[in-house]
Amino acid sequence: MSMIMLESLIVFVLAKYSFTKYLIFANVDLSQYAEGGSPLPGMTMTFSLIVIAVYIALFLIASFVTFKKRDVA
């Protein structure tokens, strides 16, 4: 819950770095695209959706590996 509240602060503080547009925090709020803007320069709706999909895939793989190792057979 605290990460959701700190999302905009994290993006604001790290906005001067180029890697910020690849962070999950900068891509979660898709409502900014509906208003015609973007969270950071050079970002589009498609870019944000791809970044979110990559994060979901990474989280699913990490959780699958972790729970597979802890599986009691």
Image (cartoon, helix red, strand yellow):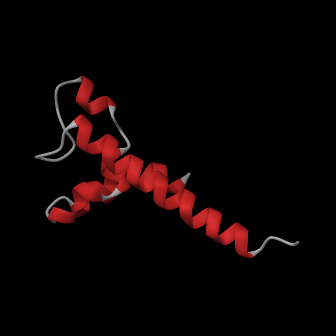
Q: Is residue 59 left or right of residue 42?
A: right
Picture coordinates of residue 59, whole percent (x, y):
52, 59
Farthest residue to the bottom: give it. 69
Q: Quadrant of residue 29?
A: top left
Q: Residue at x 11, y 46 (%)?
A: 42
- Give the number of marks: 0
User: Percent x, y for residue 12?
Assistant: 24, 55
Question: Given the current orientation, which residue lies at the most extreme right position?
Answer: 73
* In-image side of 13 versus 41 (left or right): right
In screen coordinates, is 72 left or right of 5?
right
Left-right relation of 62 to 56: right
What residue appears at the point 30 percent right and 50 percent down from the top-left corner?
A: 26
The residue sitting at the left extreme is 41
Residue 35, placed above or below residue 25: above
* Placement of the C terminus among the 4 image quadrants: bottom right
Q: Position of residue 23 (x, y in %)?
A: 32, 58
Q: Nearer the viewer, residue 5 or 32?
A: 32
Q: Who's the residue at 32% across and 46% down the image?
A: 50
List x then y, in percent, for residue 46: 25, 37
Can you tell which quarter of the image residue 35 is in?
top left
Q: Residue at x 17, y 26 (%)?
A: 36
